[in-house]
Image (cartoon, helix red, strand yellow):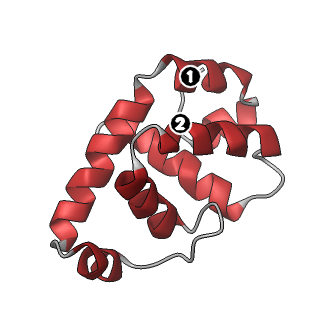
Protein backbone atom coordinates (compact mmCIF):
# COMPACT_ATOMS: atom_id res chain seq x y z
CA UNK A 1 0.00 0.00 0.00
CA UNK A 2 1.52 3.34 -1.00
CA UNK A 3 1.51 6.35 1.33
CA UNK A 4 -1.54 7.99 -0.26
CA UNK A 5 -3.53 4.76 -0.03
CA UNK A 6 -2.41 4.35 3.56
CA UNK A 7 -3.75 7.84 4.37
CA UNK A 8 -7.20 6.85 3.10
CA UNK A 9 -7.07 3.58 5.04
CA UNK A 10 -6.03 5.40 8.23
CA UNK A 11 -8.73 8.03 7.75
CA UNK A 12 -11.44 5.38 7.32
CA UNK A 13 -10.29 3.73 10.55
CA UNK A 14 -10.35 7.13 12.26
CA UNK A 15 -13.88 7.74 10.96
CA UNK A 16 -14.96 4.43 12.46
CA UNK A 17 -13.16 4.85 15.79
CA UNK A 18 -13.46 8.56 16.63
CA UNK A 19 -16.58 10.64 16.94
CA UNK A 20 -14.60 13.69 18.02
CA UNK A 21 -11.86 13.95 15.39
CA UNK A 22 -13.98 13.50 12.27
CA UNK A 23 -16.82 15.96 11.71
CA UNK A 24 -20.24 14.96 10.40
CA UNK A 25 -19.52 17.10 7.34
CA UNK A 26 -16.31 15.19 6.63
CA UNK A 27 -18.10 11.87 7.09
CA UNK A 28 -20.78 12.98 4.61
CA UNK A 29 -18.15 14.16 2.13
CA UNK A 30 -16.29 10.87 2.42
CA UNK A 31 -19.50 8.93 1.86
CA UNK A 32 -20.07 10.91 -1.35
CA UNK A 33 -16.53 10.17 -2.52
CA UNK A 34 -16.91 6.46 -1.79
CA UNK A 35 -20.31 6.39 -3.52
CA UNK A 36 -18.62 7.64 -6.70
CA UNK A 37 -16.66 4.36 -6.80
CA UNK A 38 -19.87 2.42 -7.42
CA UNK A 39 -22.23 0.34 -5.28
CA UNK A 40 -20.07 -2.79 -5.00
CA UNK A 41 -16.96 -0.86 -4.00
CA UNK A 42 -18.97 1.23 -1.53
CA UNK A 43 -20.35 -1.95 0.01
CA UNK A 44 -16.87 -3.47 0.32
CA UNK A 45 -15.42 -0.35 1.97
CA UNK A 46 -18.46 0.19 4.21
CA UNK A 47 -18.49 -3.38 5.48
CA UNK A 48 -14.70 -3.61 5.85
CA UNK A 49 -14.59 -0.50 8.04
CA UNK A 50 -18.09 -0.58 9.56
CA UNK A 51 -19.10 2.76 8.08
CA UNK A 52 -22.38 4.40 7.05
CA UNK A 53 -24.52 2.02 9.09
CA UNK A 54 -22.88 -1.15 7.77
CA UNK A 55 -21.75 -3.89 10.12
CA UNK A 56 -17.97 -4.31 10.15
CA UNK A 57 -16.95 -7.67 8.69
CA UNK A 58 -13.63 -9.46 8.26
CA UNK A 59 -12.08 -9.85 4.81
CA UNK A 60 -13.09 -13.53 4.62
CA UNK A 61 -16.78 -12.72 5.13
CA UNK A 62 -16.71 -9.91 2.57
CA UNK A 63 -14.93 -12.18 0.10
CA UNK A 64 -17.53 -14.94 0.54
CA UNK A 65 -20.35 -12.42 0.08
CA UNK A 66 -18.87 -11.28 -3.24
CA UNK A 67 -17.67 -14.76 -4.27
CA UNK A 68 -14.01 -13.79 -4.55
CA UNK A 69 -10.86 -14.42 -2.52
CA UNK A 70 -9.80 -12.25 0.42
CA UNK A 71 -6.76 -11.25 -1.64
CA UNK A 72 -9.10 -9.93 -4.35
CA UNK A 73 -10.91 -7.82 -1.75
CA UNK A 74 -7.57 -6.40 -0.58
CA UNK A 75 -6.69 -5.58 -4.20
CA UNK A 76 -10.05 -3.87 -4.71
CA UNK A 77 -9.55 -1.82 -1.53
CA UNK A 78 -6.06 -0.74 -2.57
CA UNK A 79 -7.29 0.21 -6.05
CA UNK A 80 -10.15 2.21 -4.54
CA UNK A 81 -7.85 3.95 -2.05
CA UNK A 82 -5.54 5.03 -4.88
CA UNK A 83 -8.52 6.38 -6.85
CA UNK A 84 -9.82 8.31 -3.83
CA UNK A 85 -6.41 9.68 -2.85
CA UNK A 86 -5.91 11.49 -6.15
CA UNK A 87 -9.33 13.12 -6.33
CA UNK A 88 -9.50 16.90 -5.96
CA UNK A 89 -12.27 16.37 -3.40
CA UNK A 90 -9.97 14.34 -1.12
CA UNK A 91 -7.19 16.87 -1.54
CA UNK A 92 -9.59 19.65 -0.53
CA UNK A 93 -10.76 17.65 2.51
CA UNK A 94 -7.17 17.11 3.64
CA UNK A 95 -6.61 20.87 3.68
CA UNK A 96 -9.35 21.24 6.31
CA UNK A 97 -8.06 18.51 8.65
CA UNK A 98 -6.69 19.51 12.02
CA UNK A 99 -2.98 18.96 12.66
CA UNK A 100 -3.89 16.04 14.94
CA UNK A 101 -5.94 14.29 12.24
CA UNK A 102 -3.16 14.85 9.72
CA UNK A 103 -0.66 13.33 12.13
CA UNK A 104 -2.89 10.32 12.83
CA UNK A 105 -3.31 9.51 9.13
CA UNK A 106 0.35 10.06 8.29
CA UNK A 107 0.33 13.39 6.47
CA UNK A 108 3.60 15.26 6.78
CA UNK A 109 3.20 18.91 7.66
Q: Residue at x 80, y 58 (%)?
A: 19
Q: Position of residue 66 (x, y in %)?
A: 26, 72
Q: Nearer the viewer, residue 104 or 33?
A: 33
Q: Are marks 2 and 1 in contact (CB under 8 Å)?
A: yes
Q: Position of residue 28 (x, y in %)?
A: 70, 43
Does the image show residue 23?
no
Residue 73: image quadrant is bottom left
Q: Position of residue 89 (x, y in %)?
A: 56, 22
Q: Which label number is shown at residue 89?
A: 1
Q: Residue at x 46, y 49 (%)?
A: 9
Q: Is residue 19 above or below residue 34?
A: below
Q: Nearer the viewer, residue 106 or 55?
A: 55
Q: Is residue 27 above or below residue 86?
A: below
Q: Residue at x 74, y 58 (%)?
A: 18
Please state if 44 lies on the left or on the right of 20 as rendered.
Answer: left
Q: Is residue 59 above or below residue 84?
A: below
Does the image show residue 40?
yes
Residue denoted by label 2: 33
Q: What number of labels is visible?
A: 2
Amino acid sequence: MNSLSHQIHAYLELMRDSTLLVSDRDKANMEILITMLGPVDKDIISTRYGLFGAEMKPLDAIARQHRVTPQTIEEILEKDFRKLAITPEWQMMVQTFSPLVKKKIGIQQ
